[in-house]
Amino acid sequence: MATPRTSEVRPRLLAVAALLLLPALLALHFGLVSVLLALGSSAAVSTGNNVWLSAADAISRNNPEVHVAIARYERQRAIITADGFRDIHLQESLARWQKAQQLRPLWPYYQLGAFDAEILLDAPAEVIQQRMNTLMTLAPNERGMDRSLLELALFGWQKLTPEQQVWSLERLDSTRYETRKAVLQTAARIGVKPVLCSRMSWKKVRTFCR
């Protein structure tokens, strides 16, 4: 009876060993990325690169959580950076949100993060309107994002279409009291209070507008 040659058996054994080790290697990789993300997200924001997030990015491929962590860091970095470099960090933040969207296109919070970056970048009206339309379509019942979405809508109020303004007012009218109160306070701070007082139900804003 013929026996397999050593040269034939060895590749098979190596293939089996690789298959057995693959789950352990994947678990090790995911664990390492998670640790790097935790360290990077908890690190103090500075004008320099975040070495932990950079390391996570270097060993990851198509990981939306890595893109999100870097997007948030770059946004914070922009706030403490001199004006000449502020937009560079915001553009990087926006690019990372967009990469995360490509991996999870139906997750509305990535769109919300991109909307925030575009508002801070003072993007053109057509860009703001397109993003707002996407959010209105993608998350009509996602009330957990009401406060952030409505506050961003107020910051970009003059760039919204009339239909988007009406949608925002109706959304604000139907949201939780605590959320509405916080958004109205933001409106007062940025000078949009008269718009809300004149266009919303008086029952909902009378305390705020007196």
Image (cartoon, helix red, strand yellow):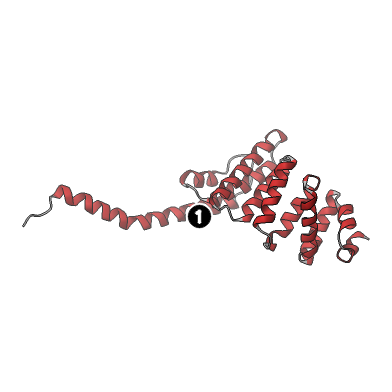
Residue appearing at x 71%, y 50% in the figure: 132
Pick the residue in front: 148 or 80.
148
Snapshot quadrant of residue 24:
bottom left
Residue 189: horizontal and vertical position, in percent? 84, 51
Task: Work out which quarter of the rendered image holds the C terminus and state it.
Answer: bottom right
Residue 68: horizontal and vertical position, in percent? 59, 50
Q: Secondary structure at mark 1?
A: helix
Residue appearing at x 12%, y 53% in the figure: 4
Mark 1 neighbour density, 10 Å: few (under 14) some (14–19) many (20 or more): some
Determine the residue located farthest toward the right in the rendered image: 210
Residue 137: horizontal and vertical position, in percent? 67, 55
- Quick check: 53 left or right of 78? left
Task: Work out which quarter of the rendered image holds the N terminus and state it.
Answer: bottom left
Kindly identify the amino acid type of the residue bearing the numbered disc 1: Ser
Pick the residue in front: 184 or 1.
1
- Quick check: 18 left or right of 104? left
Determine the residue located farthest toward the left in the rendered image: 1
Residue appearing at x 68%, y 48% in the figure: 131
Determine the residue located farthest toward the top in the rendered image: 84
Residue appearing at x 69%, y 46% in the figure: 130
Residue holding disc 1 = 34
Determine the residue located farthest toward the front in the rendered image: 163
* Number of numbered discs overlaid on the protein picture: 1
Residue 188: horizontal and vertical position, in percent? 86, 53
